[in-house]
Image (cartoon, coloured by chain):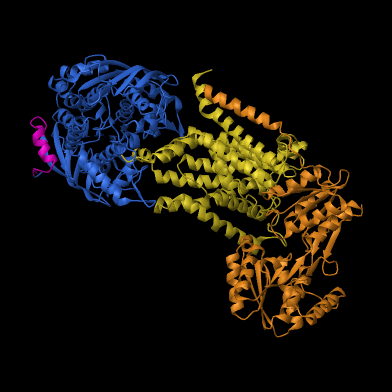
Chain colours: A blue, B orange, C yellow
Amino acid sequence: MTSPSVTPAIRMTGIEKSYGPVHANSGASLEVMPGEIHALVGENGAGKSTLMKILGGLQAPDSGKMEVNGRDVTGWTTPDAIKAGIGIVHQHFMLVPTLTVAENIVLGMEPTKSGLFDGDAANAAVEKLGRDTGLIIAPKRKVADLSVGEAQRVEILKVLFRGAKILILDEPTAVLSPPEVKELWAVMRRMRDNGGTIVLITHRLDEVMDLTDVITVMRAGKTVGKLVTRNTTPAEIAKEMVGREVVLSARDKMKSGVSAPVKTAARASAGLELRNVVVTDPLRGRVVDNVSFMVAPGEILGIAGVEGNGQTELIEAIAGLRKLVSGTISIDGKDVSYFDVAHRREVGLTHIPEDRHRRGLVLDYSVANNLVLGVQNRFSSGGVLNERKIGDYSAKQVAAYDIRPPISAAYARGFSGGNQQKIVLAREMGHGFTVLLASQPTRGVDVGAIEFIHAQLLAARGEGKAILLVSAELNEVMALSDRIAVMYRGQFAAVVDAATATTEQLGEYMIGAKKESVA
Amino acid sequence: MRKLLIVTGVLLLVHVALLFAHPKGIAGNGKPNAAHVGIVLDIGGLGDKSFNDGAWRGADSAIKLLGTNVSLIEPGEGADRESGLRLFAAEKMALVMGVGFAFSDDLTRLAKEYPQNSFAGIDFSLATDAAGNTIAPPPNLAALKFREEEGSFLVGALAALVGKSKKIGFVGGMEIPLIYKFEAGFRAGVKAVCSDCTVIAQYAGVTPEAFKNPSKGKELALSQYQQGANVIYHVSGGTGQGVFEAARITGKWAIGVDVDQYAEAPGHVLTSMVKHVDNATFNAISDVTNHSFKGGVYSLGLKEKGVDYVYDANNKAMIPDSVHTKLEQLRQDIIDGRIKVPSMR
Amino acid sequence: MSAQFRAQLEEAIIPTVIALLIAIICGDLLIISYGQAPGPVYRMLLEGTWGNWYGFGQVLYKATTLAFTGMAIAVGLRAGLFNIGAESQIAAGGLAAAMVGIWLPAATPGIIAILVCIIAAGVMGGGVAAIPAVLKTKFGAHEVIVTIMLNFIVLAFINWLITAHLHQPESVHTATIHAGFLPRLQEFFPAFHGAAANLSILVAILVAIALWYFLFKSRSGYELRAAGLQPEAAEYSGISVHNVWMKAMILSGAIAGIGGINFVLGYEHYYEDGFATGAGFLGIAVALVGRNNPFGVLVAALLFATLSQGGLAIHAFVPKQIADVLQAIVIIAISAAVPEVRRLLLASRKRVTA
C-alpha cells in the first residue's frame, strides 16, 4: 500500500533525542501515508511520546530528519506544526474548567464581532464541527461539568477547529467506557474516509487490530518493526513490543490452574463489608446509593460499569477520603466507618488509586520517598526519618517490582506510566494488608506491566487478601474477578458469578437496560 | 549547555563594554574646596512639598550662595536612617543633618561617637530622663525645634478675623502630641480675637496613614463647612489635598501648613503657616561654613523667623489691611512676651 | 564533571548568573542614562557593602531580618501556602519581644531573658498567623487574601497601640527594654563598630539549620512537603492536610515573628513603628530566589541585603529610584531564572481537567 508515487504525510528517519543521560529516542523512525490510521505501539518509556513531541514541535531532535507532506520540517516550532495541520490530542487534557465547551475550543482564535468575543458564532461553529465529525457535544456546557469522555471529545474538537489534517491521539481510550470507545472509533473511521491521517498511540492491542491499517512498533527508543495490521496477530505485535513471548490474558493463567480461587465463604465477618452505604455529592446528589456487599478473603470482587456511575466515590468512601452519609464499612469485622484515612490503613486497608498522578504519587518526590508515603511512621523513629531503612526498603522494592530505571533517588515524575504504577503497587502491596482496593490498576500501562500487575493481584488473592477491583476494562474485570458487580447510577445493578458472565450480559447492566434486584 | 555559556559570555562582554562608557559625570555640586555637608532626608524623600523639600531648598541656597557641597540620602526603611548618617560621618563631612524627629536618637548617638564632626537635627525631639527632665544634646549637635504654636496662633487669629463665622475648622492628620501643638496655638489665636468663637477640631486617624488620606480630609472638611465654618486650618500632610479640594468645591477658605500651599487651590488658600525648614537648614550650613557652629537647642519661633504666615501678592486681596495690622501687632506681642502661646491642648 | 553537577549547573546556576548579568546591564544603562559612569557607581556599591566592616555589618543586619521573613515564607511555600503576612507577623513578634523585654526585671539572667523574648516573639508571630490558618482549614478562606488583609489590621492596631499608649514622648517607639539584649557583633569584633549586626544572625543560622533538618529529615517535614507538592496525594496516603497547613502556617508566622528580635533585642532595644517595613514582602523574593531551601534563603538574604545597603551607599551619586529599580530588576530576573518559579509559571498555564 505504500506506492512510491504517493508522498508520505509524515516521514521521520533516524531521530535521536536525549534528556541528559537518558536516550529517549535513538534511531526512531516513522512513515505514515495520507489517509491511513497508523498505530504507534510500544511499552511505556519506549519513546513514543518523545517522537510525537518532536513531530508536534514541542521538542527539537538532536539529530535525524523529518518531513511532512514531503517538506523538510526538521526542528520546527509548535506554531509551524499547527499551521501545517498537525494536531495532537494529549493524554492529559489541557482545558480551562471554568470556561464553556465552545470557549475552550475557540480559545486562541476566538471569533469576534466589532472587536468583542462573539459567543453565538463560537457556539454555532462548534455545533457545526460536531455535526460534521460526529463528535456531538453541547457547546454551552462548562468543561468542569463534563465526563472524561466528553472532555476528550472537546480536546479532539479543539484540535480539529485549528484545521488539523494529521491527528495524533495519545492513548485516547485509556479513560473511555466501551460505548464511548465505539463512538470514537466511528469518528476516526469517518475522518480517515474523508482523507484525514491519524496516528494512534496505544497499549491496547485489540484496538490496534480493530481499527488501524499499519502498525509501527517501538522498543527502547528505537523503531523495531512495521507491520500491516491485516497480516499480523496481537501475539506477534506484543512480541515485537516486549522482545519476548507474552501471555496476553490473565484468565488464561487462571484457567491453566496457576492459582485456583480460594473459596472461603464461611468466614462471614472477615474481609471487607459494606452495609447500606450512601455517599452524596453537592452537585450530583446520591452518587453511591445504598450499596451493600462483602468481599471475602481470597476473593476478587470486580466492579464493572461505565465511568461516572459512582465507582470513584465508592472507592473513596471506603478509603476514607469521602464522608458517608449513612451506612457502615467494616474491615475484618471492625467498623471503620468513622476512621480517618490513616486509621483505616492501620487496620489493614490498602489502596491503588485510579489516578496515580493526582493521588497515587507525589510526582516531585523520589521513588524512595514515594515508597514510604502513608507508612512513613514505620520508617521513622522519634519523628526523624530513618533514611537508611528507607533506602534499603526502596532498593528491595525497586528490584522486586522491576521498577525501571532502578534509581531510588529519581523523581517519580520522570518515570513512564507503567513504572509509576509499579511504584504505587510496590508501596500498597509491599506491607501487610487484608483488604486491597484496586482502582483502574492497569490504566495507561503497557502490556508487560499489565501482565505483571495482574499477576500481583492474583498472587494477593492466593494469599487470602480481599480485593475490590474497579476497572473500566471489562475484559480485565472478567479475567480477574470471582464475582462481578455492575454499577449503574450509584447502585449495584447486578452481582454475577464471573465464571458464567458474558460481555453482552454485563453490557446490558452497564447501560441500565437491565436491572437485577440485588440481595 | 553550550548555548547558555555563549549567552553568558555575550552578556559579560556587553557589560564590560558599558563599563567603558564615561558620560559627563555629575561631580560635586559646590566649589571644590568648600565644606561638605550630608543630609539624610526622612522616609518620603524629595517631592513631599514639605519638610524634605524645605531642607533641600535650604541646602540649594547654600550650594548657590556659599558654594557648599551637599550630598543627600533618601532612606528606604527605618534602619537606613542611622546607616545614612554613618555613611556621611565616616566620610568626615563637616555637617551631618537628619531631617525629622525620628533621627533624634541616632543623631545623639553619632554625635557622641564623632565628637569632631557637627550634627544637626530638624524637629529634633529631646530625650527625657527618668524624672521627666529633658536631657541636653551633646555639644556638637544642634537640635532645631520649631514653635509651631506661635505661627498657628497668628493664622488662628486671621481665620477668626476674616471668616465671618463663629465657627472655625481644624483638620489634623494623625493624633499625636506634635499635631496637638498646632491645634493649641490655633485655638488660642482664635480666642484672642473672638472670645465666643468655637473651633471644630477633627483628626483623620491614629496611624501614619492619616497623613496621606485625601478622601478622609475632604470628608472632614466638607462636614465642617456644612456646620458653618468658613475657614479650615489643616495640619495633615497629604490629607490636606482633600481639604483644599473641599474649599474649592464650596468656594470657602483653607489654610495651608509647613510650606506656602497657595498653589494647591489658588484663591481659596487664605494663607499658610510656614515652618522655615529652609532657613534653619541654610543657617546651620552657613554656621558650619563660617566655623561658627554651636550645638545646643535652637527653639525657632516668630522671633527667630522659624515660623511665619504667608502674606504676599497672592493673598493680599483676601486680607484687609486692618486685619494685617492687627496680626502684626499680635506678632509683636508674642515676640515681646506679652502673649504666651500655649503648646498643650 | 558529574552528570548531577552538570544538571545543577544547567538548571540552576547558569540561569541565575545570566539573570544577574541582565540585571547588571539594565543597571549600566540606567546609570548611564542618568549621566554617571557605571564603573564607579558599582565600585561604590561594593565598597559600601562588602568593602568595609561597617558596610558589611549593615549587610549582615539587613540579611538577618530578610533571612527570617524569607524562611517564614519558604516554609509556607513548602507546604503549599503563600504567607503574604510576614510583614505584620514580624512587627507583632518585635512588639512582643519588646513588651516582654520591658516587663522583665533588669536582673534577669541574659540568656533566659533572651530566650523568653524570642519565645514571646515566636508565639506572637505564630498567633497572628493562626488566624489565616484557622480561616483556611475550617472555612476554606484563601490564605493570600486573609494574610494581606490581616497585614492592614495588625499593623494599624500595633500603630494605634504605640501612638496611643506605648510610645515615648515625641517619638513612635516604645521605652527601652530592661533585659534580653542581644550583643552586637562589634562586642566581639571591634571592626564592626557602629554596625547594627548582632547575635540575631546566629539565631537566624540556628533556625535555618533546624528548619532544614525539620523539612528534609523529619517525618513531619516529609508530610509537610508532600502536602505542599500534592495535597490530594498526601490526603490519600492518610496525611491530614488541614492539620499540616495549620501547623505550617503557624510555624511560618513564628519564624517571621522571631525576625523581630533583630531590631528589638539586637539593635535599638525598643519597638519602633515600621522597623521592618517591606521586609515581609522582600522576604517573598528572598524565598523564591533561595528556592525555598533554608540555606538558599540565607544566601538570597545576603544578596538582597547587599543591594539594599549598596543602594544607600550610591544615593549620593544617583537617585534613590535607580537603586530601587535595580533591586526590582534583580528580583524579576532571578525569580524568572529559578526553576521552581519557572515551573509555577508553566503550571499555571496548563491547568488540566482529567
Answer with left or right where residue C332 lies relative to residue B312.
left
Looking at the picture, tell me which residue is in the foreground, B189 or C267. B189
Q: Is residue A398 magenta?
A: no
Q: Is residue A502 magenta?
A: yes
Give the extent of the magenta segment: A497-516
Answer with left or right where residue B275 lies relative to residue C11.
right
- Which residue extends farthest bottom? B196
Total numbered circles: 0
Q: Residue C200: horizontal and vertical position, in percent?
A: 65, 42
Q: Is residue A455 above or below residue A470?
A: above
Answer with left or right where residue C338 lies relative to residue C46.
left
Q: Residue C25: horizontal and vertical position, in percent?
A: 63, 34
Looking at the picture, tell me which residue is in the foreground, A343 or B145. B145
Q: Quadrant of the N terminus of chain C?
A: top right
Q: Residue A167: horizontal and vertical position, in percent?
A: 28, 31
Q: Residue C289, can we see it?
A: no
Q: Quadrant of the C terminus of chain C?
A: top left
Give the image quarter of residue A365. Answer: top left
- Which residue extends farthest right? B291
Identity of the residue drawn at 92% across and 53% down: B290
Looking at the picture, tell me which residue is in the foreground, C254 or B120. B120
Looking at the picture, tell me which residue is in the foreground, A291 or A70. A70
Identity of the residue drawn at 55% across and 57% down: C152
Q: Residue A262, can we see it?
A: yes
